[in-house]
């Protein structure tokens, strides 16, 4: 689901080695120079691969981020005026995207509907870079109403046990290289151990990793979107390894690790 080139890694089925390329779920397909033999899957933005179409009101915390009326990322409503998303979703290369360029869509499973809000402030994590600290807050110009279809989600305050099943959702690509979805989709994924996550990604903290059966998982366009357990937000979609629906785990920012930063940043405004 969710756009920048990724670091080389190596990974076997048991996560003993790393061998793959990480891509932000917001990245578009890219083709390396040198002809067809040099092609590699570069995906910065994604949609949920596999899974099902969400029911109306099933994910009242889910929002879409638009730029130029086009989907760029997902996000989660955590307060009537605050959205949590990925930091790479608010950058265009090295430049921070201005608040005036982002529109938040809430309260819908169809990108053509919903309630729209302009953004007042864009606040990425100060130490974001190299696939780490990939979280950002958006403060809305106007609070969203509380309805059956629009409702903030609670933040997870502690770690998530390995083996737990989470729900991921987004409007990203439906399969590697495929179209984005106009309807919100969701799927299930399984939490791996912290050690397996480190071995697969090379990132030692602030990250939670999920595995899914092949041809399932996050894809381009899903960046910034939620991973949920027991009605609590546990992860923010950051990157995939190799390609959408691969056997490699997907990387999400671990919400419980960023709780102090989230609370401190929101209090400033």
Image (cartoon, helix red, strand yellow):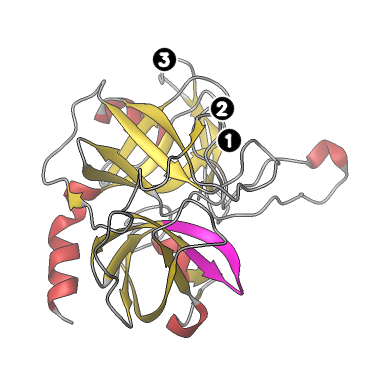
Q: Magenta segment: does it hold 51?
A: no
Task: Give the magenta range.
Answer: 65-74
Please tell me the numbered disc located at residue 246: 2
The residue lying at 26 percent from left, 47 percent from top is: 206
Question: Would you name the residue on which mark 1 appears?
Answer: 244
x and y percent of residue 80 in the render?
23, 69
The answer to whether residue 12 is above or below residue 220 is above
Q: Locate the C terminus and report the quarter of the image it occupies.
A: bottom left
Mark 1 is surrounded, within 10 Å at the Cα level, by few (under 14), some (14 to 19) or many (20 or more) other residues, namely many
x and y percent of residue 243 in the render?
60, 35
Regarding mark 1 in the picture, which secondary structure is present there?
Answer: loop
- The part of the image, by quadrant, that contains residue 118 is bottom left
Which is nearer the eye, 133 or 217?
A: 217
Q: Is there CB contact under 8 Å for labels 3 and 2?
A: no
x and y percent of residue 18 in the render?
48, 28
Mark 3 is surrounded, within 10 Å at the Cα level, by few (under 14), some (14 to 19) or many (20 or more) other residues, namely few
The residue lying at 51 percent from left, 73 percent from top is: 94
The residue lying at 41 percent from left, 54 percent from top is: 224
Which mark lies nearer to you, 3 or 1? Answer: 1
The answer to whether residue 148 is above or below residue 201 is below
Q: Of all residues shown, which one is farthest toward the right?
A: 35
Question: Would you name the residue on which mark 3 appears?
Answer: 14
Regarding mark 2 in the picture, which secondary structure is present there?
Answer: loop
Regarding mark 3 in the picture, which secondary structure is present there?
Answer: loop
């Amino acid at each position: 689901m969710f756009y920048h080139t990724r670091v080389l890694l190596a990974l076997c089925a048991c996560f003993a080695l790393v061998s793959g390329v990480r891509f932000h779920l917001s990245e578009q397909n890219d083709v390396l120079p040198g002809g067809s033999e040099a092609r590699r899957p570069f995906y910065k933005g994604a949609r949920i691969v596999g899974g099902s179409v969400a029911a109306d009101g099933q994910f009242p915390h889910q929002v879409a981020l638009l730029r130029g009326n086009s989907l760029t990322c997902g996000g989660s409503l955590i307060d009537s005026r605050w959205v949590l998303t990925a930091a790479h979703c608010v950058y265009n290369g090295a430049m921070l995207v201005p608040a005036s360029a982002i529109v938040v869509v809430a309260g819908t499973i169809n990108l053509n509907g919903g309630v729209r809000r302009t953004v007042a402030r864009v606040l990425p994590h100060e130490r974001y870079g190299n696939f780490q600290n990939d979280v950002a807050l958006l403060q809305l110009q106007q609070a969203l109403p509380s309805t059956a279809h629009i409702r903030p989600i609670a933040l997870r305050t502690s770690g998530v046990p390995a083996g737990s099943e989470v729900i991921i959702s987004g409007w990203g690509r439906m399969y590697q290289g495929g179209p984005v979805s106009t309807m919100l989709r969701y799927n299930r994924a399984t939490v791996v151990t912290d050690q397996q996550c480190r071995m697969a990604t090379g990132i030692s903290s602030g990250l939670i990793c999920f595995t899914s059966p092949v041809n399932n998982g996050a894809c381009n366009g899903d960046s910034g979107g939620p991973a949920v357990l027991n009605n609590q937000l546990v992860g923010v979609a950051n990157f995939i390894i190799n390609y959408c629906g691969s056997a490699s785990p997907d990387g999400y920012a671990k919400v419980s690790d960023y709780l102090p930063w989230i609370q401190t940043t929101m209090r400033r405004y």
